[in-house]
């Protein structure tokens, strides 16, 4: 089996960024008893879609599921959950929902799509949103 798994946060973000989406790592410190593994935000201040990776949930047969939500209202319908092991399937699903992968909102004036603005102080390495004492 490949080292690069869709359930690996770094791989997931890298592949979405490579395909033109803006991706912010939001949370990765769910408890061991929780089926959720991590949550990212796609295209903040535009579609602002949260994607949560769900693993080892009853009835998933070890295939990961990804829940899509805008945080206020769900994307088009109730919470959409996509069960897949393929990043390509997930990207096609985002595009079918109308999520823009050609955003220029956070691209600097240089015109280089590789140079995006930092996401302020948020960082998975620091254990964001895990109720740290600050």
Image: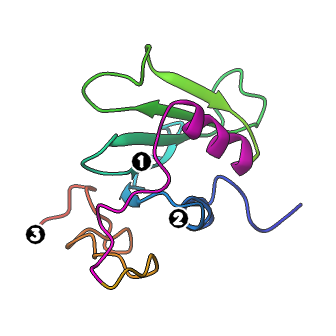
Q: Which residue is mark 1?
A: 30
Establish if 112 lies above or below 6: below
Image marks 3 and 2: residues in contact by CB distance under 8 Å:
no
Image marks 1 and 2: residues in contact by CB distance under 8 Å:
no
- Which of the numbered marks, if any, corresponds to residue 134? 3
SS at circle 1: loop
At x 46% / y 80%, what residue is drawn? Answer: 114
Q: Is residue 28 found left or right of 7 in the rendered image?
A: left
Q: Residue furthest top?
A: 77
3 or 2: mark nearer the eye: 2
Chain-order first, disc 3 or disc 2: 2
Q: CA distance from mark 3 to mark 1?
A: 19 Å
Q: Position of residue 55 (x, y in %)?
A: 62, 39
Which colouring convention does the figure follow? rainbow
Decide which of 25, 89 is in the foreground and name it: 89
- Which of the numbered marks, if any, corresponds to residue 73? none
Q: Which residue is mark 2?
A: 17
Q: Residues within 10 Å of mark 1 (few under 14, many from 20)?
A: some
Q: Look at the image and tell me in which quarter the N terminus lies.
A: bottom right
At x 39% / y 82%, what residue is drawn? Answer: 115
Chain-order first, disc 3 or disc 1: 1
At x 72% / y 41%, what residue is drawn? Answer: 89
Q: CA distance from mark 1 to mark 2?
A: 24 Å
Q: What residue span does the magenta drawing correspond to?
A: 87-109
SS at circle 2: helix
Establish if 122 lies above or below 34: below
Q: Residue furthest left?
A: 134
């Amino acid at each position: 089996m490949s080292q690069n798994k869709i359930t690996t946060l770094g791989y997931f973000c890298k592949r979405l960024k490579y395909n033109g989406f803006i991706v912010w790592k939001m949370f990765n410190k769910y408890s061991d008893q929780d089926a959720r593994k991590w949550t990212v935000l796609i295209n903040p201040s535009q579609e602002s879609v949260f994607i949560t990776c769900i693993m080892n949930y009853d009835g998933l047969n070890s295939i990961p599921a990804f829940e899509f939500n805008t945080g206020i209202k769900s994307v088009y319908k109730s919470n959409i959950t996509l069960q897949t092991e393929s990043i390509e399937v997930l990207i096609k699903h985002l595009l079918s929902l109308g999520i823009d992968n050609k955003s220029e909102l956070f691209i600097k004036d240089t015109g280089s799509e590789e140079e995006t603005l930092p996401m302020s102080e948020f960082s998975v390495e620091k254990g964001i949103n895990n109720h740290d004492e600050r």
